[in-house]
Amino acid sequence: MTALGFLYPGHSAEDDYPRIEQLLGSDIRLDVVHTDIGEDAHRVDALRRMGAPERLAKGVEQLRLAGAEAIVWACTSGGFVYGWEGAQEQVRALATTAGMAASSTSFAFVHAAQEIGVGRVAVAATYPDDVAALFAGFLRAGGVEVTGVHSAGMVTAAEVGTWDETEVFALARAADSPDAQAVLLPDTALHTAAHLPALEKELGKPVLAANQVTVWEALRLTDRRVNAPGLGALFTREPIVQV
């Protein structure tokens, strides 16, 4: 059994995690601890407060007691708003506090893009324009070219958590462009786990979504690779028959 720990802010799309656990179909357990979201606002100052070290530290002990082998800050905007260097410091502090390997969803997107071999991506962001632009800048700092950014302008995670399949597909289609090799959906408040194969079929290219890449990143930290086509192209890099 591999136990993976996730610090998830508030309550929006955390039910993606038991769904992903089921789709993995392996000896993997996903443990989610909710952190204090503070002010629910896709605004830089609020997001920086949400990702503050003291807020993240409060959930670490519970995951450690659950036997987690790695921990991921399951919030994209609460990482990239610190910039590349600041987000690295955030992860280092989390790893030190937890006493285990750590990462964040922001870095998961960069690593996942590298994993599937895409260098040009389109960003389908629920965020306002200024926050979405910061994510694009973060990706560029990680060596990923951004062909375009579509912003839905949603102010709160609570609003995003109510979106259904129709709205998710519309967001992805609005962001896509012929020169993009993949489409990225960066908000962990967005329900995406149930839609990944259909999204990829619709767009004809890989889709990287926040909760999907967050779990993949935790698996990467523990040197686990799983073939799970129900989670999109990112999870089809390994052979079907596994030891």
Image (cartoon, grey):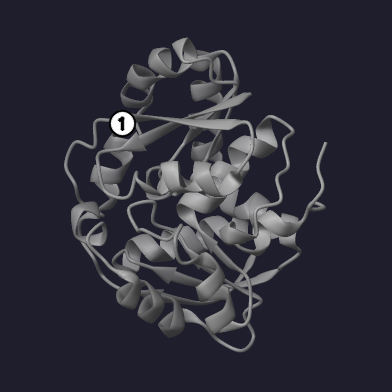
Foreground: 96 or 8? 8
> Residue 144 lies in what quarter of the image?
bottom right
Q: In the displayed structure, would residue 102 be above or below residue 200? A: above
Does residue 163 appear left or right of residue 72 in this picture? left
Instruction: For mark 1, give the secondary structure.
Output: strand
Does residue 47 appear left or right of residue 110 in this picture? left
Of all residues, the one furthest to the bottom in this rendering is 178
Q: In the displayed structure, would residue 183 be above or below residue 186? A: below
Query: Could you tell me residue 182's position as x and y percent?
Result: 61, 72
Give me the residue at 24% from left, 53% from top: 157
Query: Could you tell me residue 184's position as x and y percent?
Result: 52, 66
- Residue type pointed to by label 1: His
Query: Could you tell me residue 91's position as x and y percent?
Result: 53, 30
- For label 1, the residue is 34
Give me the residue at 71% from left, 51% from top: 227
Does residue 81 appear left or right of residue 139 in this picture? left
Query: Could you tell me residue 35's position as x and y percent?
Result: 30, 30
Give me the residue at 29% from left, 68% from top: 164
Q: Could you tell me if residue 241 is visible in this image?
A: yes
Image quarter where the C terminus lies is top right
Does residue 183 appear left or right of residue 192 in this picture? right
Image quarter where the N terminus lies is top right
The residue carrying pointer 1 sits among few (fewer than 14), some (14 to 19) or many (20 or more) residues within 10 Å by Cα, namely some
